[in-house]
Image: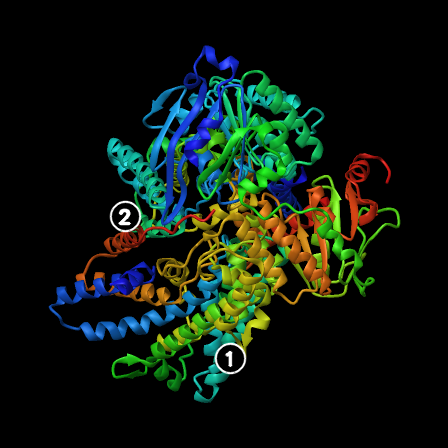
Amino acid sequence: MLRSLLPALSLALVLIAIAWLNPRAISYFGFSLMLNLAIPIALATIAQMFVIAGNELDLSIGTFVGFVGCVTATWLKDAPLLGVVILLGSIGVYALLGALIHLRNLPSIVVTLGMSFVWQGLAILILPKPGGKAPDWLLALMAFKPPFIPFPIIAALLIAAVVHFGLMRTSYGVILRGSGGNSAALKRAGWSLLRTKIALFALTGLFGVLSGMALIGITTSADANIGNGYTLLSIAGVILGGGEFVGGRVSPIGAVIGALTLALAASPLLTFMHIPPDWQVAANGAILIIVLAARVLISRRER
Amino acid sequence: MASLRTLLARPWIWSFFGALLVWLATIAFTGGYGGGGMITAALSLAVFTVIVGVGQMFVITLGPGNVDLSLPANIGLASAVAMKVMDGNDAMIAVGLLAALACGMAIGAVNYLLIWALRIPPIIATLSASFVIQSVDISYGRGLQIKPPPGFADFTNWQVFGIPVLAILTVLFTIGAGIVLQRMIYGRSVLAIGQNIRAAWLAGVSVGRTRFLTYMLSGALGGLDGALLAGYFRGANVDIGNEYLLASIAVVVIGGTSVAGGKANVPGVWGAALFLVLLLTMLNTFGVSVGVRLVLTGLIIVGVITAAGGQKALR
Amino acid sequence: MPEASADIIRPDGAEKHFGAVSMDIIRLDGAEKHFGAVRALAGVDFSVRAGECVGLVGHNGAGKSTLMHMVAGTLTPDGGQIAVRGGVEASYSVPRAQQLGIRCVFQELSLCPNLSVAENTRINHASLHGFGWRRKAADLIAAKLDEIFPGHSISASDIVGDLSITSRQMVEVARAFTVTQEPLELVILDEPTSSLDAQTAGQLLAFVRRFIAAGKSCILISHVLGEVLGNADRIVVMRDGKVVAAGQADQFDRDRLVTAMGGAEAREKAAAEIASGKPGPGPLRVRARPPRQQDGNELVARAGEIIGLAGLAGHGQTDLLLAIFAAASRAKTGIEVTAPVALVAGDRQSDGIFPQWSIAENIGIRSLARLRNGLLISPQREAELAELWQRKIGIRTPDMNNNIFSLSGGNQQKALFARALGSDAKIVLMDDPMRGVDIGTKLEVYDLVREEARHGRTFLWYTTETEELDNCDHIYVFKNGRIVANLRRDELTEEKIIQSSFGDAA
């Protein structure tokens, strides 16, 4: 029981650390600032979670987010129709990759590793130099300031609720998760594994697109390398959220919480602690290690 | 005929085949000019990928989820350590190499400590560790302008009849790695753990020690690679190892090692490393832009793995 | 022989009204199947009628599972034809079988461990969707579990991976009998009681009889011949991919079945008694107290003894074996182990087999240190070890360098025995290793175990089959993770074990 609460406890731990270091950060403005990048990270984590649910791994999600960012900051603003077609097409590419991986029985790590070069190359071709501009409607959306609760928190709740319902509560969500748990059993019961794999990869593509768009809505302009860190962040988010690499054991709510934990731990905490720039990356790693260590301690006490 | 078929059934043959094809395409483009020099250059560069690739191969063979993401940071730090210890002095070469090895092994030990103590997937443990190592490197190697000792720089660039000596040594090393894998208790233990960790424990394999040694090995090879890279490129650099994260994983898997674990392939690492280096050379020769080069590299990796086909699912 | 099989079945009074053909739920004529060079099925005729329970027996590798995969539609025959209710099926498949009401409980569990019991039910029912499907699925499976296994403690919201293997098998069986849109006519039960204890197995078989009485059909595959003899209306015996005998159940008895299967001769208990004249107990090998034990009971094993661990499935026997295994390499409180230990796994796939390796490599892994020549493992010594045990334990294969999966299940199990017995271990732990193994293999291994014990080895043998306890010198009965009884062989009776397994006190 406590095991499923671990992601939330990790998040609480980081929040307590922030409150202790700088009580003023626990405010509407503080959260808006600290969770600035939480939405794209949460969306990328959800994207990664879908492939992990099917026992695969997407090492290209980071460069894909970057590619989407470049499309968003150029075509989606200048030629919206073409931009939409390209983004839908890229989701189609993800679906095709799922089909290819299933039909030829390929290791997804290698295929997506190859694709990470492709997306990066395309991003550089679209935007050789940092630049471009997000469409106005996207800027307006991401700058939305609801009363009382900061937008990133509302968005995270919404993302978690929608994906939780879709994957954990609908009858086809059961089939998608089952394909990661015991694919032979699913096949025997007459379900198409090709279709489940295509669905999982297409969902990854869809949330990758949403992540890239959200990111550009916040940063306002793009850069071909803008999403590179998201591959590892998204994997870490899924694991922090209680997901496992094999066996279809994933949790959308956990994944969003994991992403929030990472987003919080990333920069604001470090600025409060007056850590020199040289050691900021180390502090990131240290926070990840501390959170995971706390998790081990809690689960030991549980037993 | 039958032997040809068994040869073709070996997954690693495809990577050599791909390397050959890329080489032929390039010399066809240049009209046969520079074919030999290209091989020499490819061998010199492939060595660095092969060394870390072998380490990564042992790690990946341990089974699903096992991967060493700390290699780039490890290489970067070890290159700085080696240069600082050698301090441009030929007499200190051996000590510097040992220091780089020790640095890599320490990183490997920390990796396994995190995996074991925190019971977290290796992918996350090595990632967290790499963040910390990266910072140590940035802080330690800031403004480091030390050149390698001339003897060391010459050694890493030394060629005999157009064949880099380092490549010959690395071939010997990979043969040794193959023997360790198939004929020593340690190698068999790695393979057993990769196939079924629980069955391996119940069959009396010392699981903890084997995994510990494997992460140490990967770390040590990363450290060695860092020192050699610093010698070859005449100086240490924080980013010197960056490309080896994807490259080390790519050569292992293109080379026919199973990502599901329990099945390793040593010759394939060489084939895949040569293939990737030659591919890069080919695209440079064709004079394409960075973007096109990346797209083609990616498509070719996907194409090769699709053509070679996947392994039969076991479970 | 196969042609004769159809003749033995004579239509009785009830059938005359309908004619034999239309009464067949399913009929296979001359079914053939090849896997590479191996002929798994060589022209088999097989049929099941409405309101009939057909018992199917044969050794591992006799072709039973292949035949059942065809009936379920998961395998397509290479030759022959399939007819359902008299109509020939041109393209028979899983969806078609489901449509016709044919279900299957396969030997390997086909539940998704990451899903709940209700969600696993949903997987087999395409019609369980839309608003309120979760409630419907939960009610469906809960009602069926209540019906088959009254008094079970499984909740529909339990995650399958958290359940014991016994509970999982109960869920799997119950799921096969749930009905939504598609009809339910025939259920194939492939070793349905292999992980059940005596009580739940009895509940299941009683349910099967009610199911048959209601006019439905069933195919029952079991290595427990008593189950087949006691519950089937008709019995079909297979050997080497052919049907070698078939007839009404009352025409068979245990001995006739065993003879038809072609296994070793059925032997009397007396064989086991020979060992009674052996010398007194040797030095202490294992002394272990289960962690939950409150009284002074503990397990004691000496050199040359075969110790049985009995009781209902999943009551702490495996846990104790694993604790003893762990204690051999790292000191543990409450457990004393004085010699090297090897373990023979019961769950071959998850605890024993290395799927990428040859038979020889699978045997050698426990003995690598002794197979070395200097620093390197000697391929020659490894081959010698494998060949020695191939002869000794009778592993049926042309080449020990073939992949382990080229062996039938029983022979894979023999390879695992060879791994343990070929090692330097003085103590051998057996975790219900005969689960789903054919009787011929069993008898061969029993002899070997007794012989090895005479040479001073100690065996700790957890088994769910009471007959196997006859081979033991001493039996500990487990309940709720504790030792509740401690019996010598001459005190052993089935009643005593059942009494201690179910009673409150020893």
The amino acid beneath tag 1 is Leu
Residue that carries the numbered disc 1 in the rendered image: B98
Q: Nearer the viewer, mark 2 or mark 1?
A: 1
Cα distance in 3D space between marks 2 and 1: 43 Å
User: Mark 1 — on which chain does it sit?
Assistant: B
Percent of width and height locating residue C91: 33, 28
Q: Is residue C294 left or right of residue A259?
A: right
C313 shown above or below A272: above
In this orientation, which residue lies closer to the viewer: C4 or C336?
A: C4
Local secondary structure at mark 1: helix
Q: Quadrant of the C terminus of chain C?
A: top right
For disc 2, the marked residue is A122
Left or right of A199? Residue A255 is right
Q: Secondary structure at mark 2?
A: helix
* Identity of the residue furthest to the left in this view: B31
Q: Do the residues under discs 2 and 1 have CB atoms within 8 angstroms?
A: no
Q: Amino acid at mark 2?
A: Leu
